[in-house]
């Protein structure tokens, strides 16, 4: 584990709100010192990847509004950084609250591989304010709609902030990237493939890549969405329809919901449970109170 020291012990019990208030002052250095040591570990290419990542996550959480994070980003995210470590480090930036963070991530995105570049877009879509900046970059041609996954484009159209969904729709139409609303036409277009003999190994590879994160088939995958074991008995035409138009028939407990929290974060997932004062979403497992 990275760098336990007297400074970190001193502030470890403080709330994120307290840390943000303190980090906004220039007279208090007790946070800056351990954060600097944590960044040193995170940037040390001779350290094991898990130790570097743990240090990076702690550094961000310790002082999420310290502008030193911007300098560390510039040093950490290089083409030589492994995609796995880089993507997890980008995910940790969800906790950061620094002016200019979105612009910096967009500026370095072009020098990174597809996995980290995609992780940056996913991060920006997780908050309403950063989504607005992303849409402006799309309007200026710096980012293309084609770089977003289909479900991400659909999520923009269904965004809980009406101004964002309207802006996304306008841009998609002007850029020729509108999400097809006539799903039956898409199903009809691809129907001829049902007459082609399937490839088992290719099918397994596609399942692992695109489906296993939410569905389980036999021993493969994760049980979040409906189980797909036994789907082979269904006609190919029905399977094609379910792949291309999955929302045509969905039980309420498997529908995707988007929730805008009071701090501007957008959480997306299936509703696992609700009560008078809590909501539970399945994705990365979020539990919200009504105050959130």
Image (tube, rainbow, N blue to C red):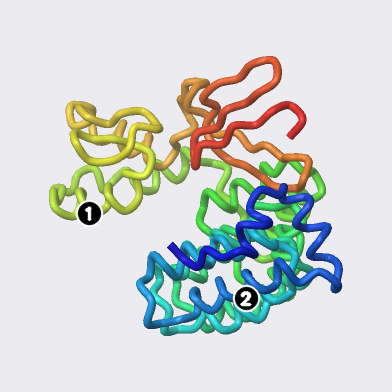
Residue lying farthest top?
Answer: 276
- The residue located at (45%, 81%) in the rendering is 44
Along the viewing direction, whichever of 56 and 32 lies nearer the viewer? 32
Residue lying farthest front?
Answer: 6
Helix, strand, or loop for circle 1?
Answer: helix
Q: Which mark is residue 235?
A: none
Marks 1 and 2: which is nearer the front?
2
- The residue located at (60%, 82%) in the rendering is 74
Q: Give the image location of residue 107, x and y in percent.
A: 65, 80
Real-space CA distance between mark 1 and mark 2, rounded to the nearest whole angstrom? 42 Å
Work out which quarter of the rendered image holds the N terminus and state it: bottom left
Work out which quarter of the rendered image holds the C terminus and state it: top right
Q: Give the image location of residue 238, x and y in percent.
A: 31, 31
Along the viewing direction, whichever of 212 and 262 lies nearer the viewer? 262
**263 to the left or right of 154:** right
- Residue 83, by quadrant, is bottom left
Q: Would you say residue 118 is visible in this rendering?
A: no
Q: Name the residue tied to disc 1.
A: 205
Q: Is residue 64 above or below residue 231?
A: below
Helix, strand, or loop for circle 2?
Answer: helix
Q: Would you say residue 155 is visible in this rendering?
A: yes
Q: Name the residue tied to disc 2.
A: 36
Q: Is residue 169 above or below residue 182?
A: below
Give the mark nearer the N terminus: 1 vs 2.
2
Q: Give the image location of residue 8, x and y in percent.
A: 62, 61
**214 to the left or right of 132:** left
Mark 2: give few (<14), some (14-19) or many (20+) Cα within 10 Å. some
Mark 1: give few (<14), some (14-19) or many (20+) Cα within 10 Å. few
- The residue located at (22%, 40%) in the rendering is 220
């Amino acid at each position: 584990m990275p760098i336990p020291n007297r400074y970190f012990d001193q502030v470890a019990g403080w709330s994120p709100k307290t840390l943000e208030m303190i980090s906004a002052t220039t007279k208090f250095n007790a946070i800056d010192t351990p954060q600097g040591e944590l960044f040193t570990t995170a940037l040390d290419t001779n350290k094991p990847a898990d130790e570097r990542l743990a240090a990076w996550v702690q550094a961000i959480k310790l002082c999420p509004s310290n502008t030193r994070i911007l300098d560390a980003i510039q040093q950490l995210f290089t083409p030589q950084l492994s995609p796995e470590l880089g993507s997890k480090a980008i995910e940790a930036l969800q906790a950061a609250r620094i002016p200019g963070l979105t612009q910096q991530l967009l500026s370095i995105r072009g020098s990174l591989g597809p996995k980290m570049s995609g992780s940056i877009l996913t991060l920006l879509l997780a908050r309403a304010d950063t989504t607005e900046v992303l849409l402006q970059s799309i309007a200026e041609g710096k980012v293309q709609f084609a770089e977003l996954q289909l479900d991400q484009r659909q999520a923009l159209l269904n965004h809980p902030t009406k101004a964002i969904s309207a802006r996304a729709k306008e841009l998609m139409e002007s850029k020729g990237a509108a999400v097809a609303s006539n799903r039956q036409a898409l199903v009809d277009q691809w129907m001829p493939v049902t007459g082609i003999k399937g490839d088992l190994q290719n099918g397994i590879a596609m399942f692992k890549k695109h489906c296993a994160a939410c569905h389980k088939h036999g021993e493969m995958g994760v049980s979040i969405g409906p189980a797909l074991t036994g789907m082979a008995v269904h006609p190919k035409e029905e399977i094609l329809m379910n792949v291309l138009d999955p929302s045509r028939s969905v039980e309420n407990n498997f529908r995707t919901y988007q929730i805008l929290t009071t701090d501007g974060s957008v959480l997306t997932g299936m509703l696992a449970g609700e009560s008078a004062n809590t909501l539970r979403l399945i994705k990365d497992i979020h539990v919200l109170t009504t105050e959130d």
